[in-house]
Amino acid sequence: MMTPFMRCCSVLLLALSLGAWPCATWSTRVQGMIITGEVTAMPESGRIEVDHQVYLIRARTSADRNLRKFHMGQVVDLELDGSSATKSTQVISIAIHTGPRGSND
């Protein structure tokens, strides 16, 4: 039989363990920068050119799987795995841009 102290400790441990789990929204947080621009060359295996800038595609990502769905003239959002200033940065996701394309995009 559980004493009131043991029951209280069990409830406290359960509450702490549930509170320590990561939020569901953590899995959808942005990894790096988002670049918006027009595809200016036909996408090739492992790379895409947006606004005359070539970006490398990380292998085995959604960007790699869906690269052939995009074509010249489309405005897209590229999600990078780091800063655009770093040469080792790669594209991990590509999506059709849905918002207005202004100077702040």
Image (cartoon, grey):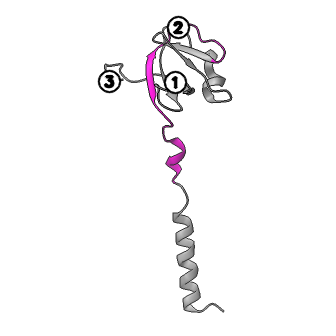
Tag 3, which secondary structure? Answer: loop
Q: Residue at x 49, y 41 (%)?
A: 29
**Magenta region:** 23-46
Q: Position of residue 49 (x, y in %)?
A: 53, 12
Mark 1 surroundings within 10 Å by alpha-carbon count, few (fewer than 14), some (14 through 19), many (20 or more): some
- Which residue in the structure is indicated by mark 2? 72
Above or below for 12 versus 20 = below
Report the amino acid beneath label 1. Answer: Ala
- Which residue in the structure is indicated by mark 3? 104
Mark found first going from the N terminus, 3 or 1:
1
Above or below for 46 versus 59 = above
Mark 2 surroundings within 10 Å by alpha-carbon count, few (fewer than 14), some (14 through 19), many (20 or more): few
Q: Quadrant of the N terminus?
A: bottom right
Q: Specify whether residue 100 is painted magenta.
A: no
Mark found first going from the N terminus, 1 or 2:
2
Q: Residue at x 63, y 22 (%)?
A: 66
Q: Position of residue 79 (x, y in %)?
A: 51, 28
Report the amino acid beneath label 2. Answer: Met
Could you tell me how far apart the alpha carbons at marks 3 and 1 are, in whole angstroms?
Answer: 18 Å
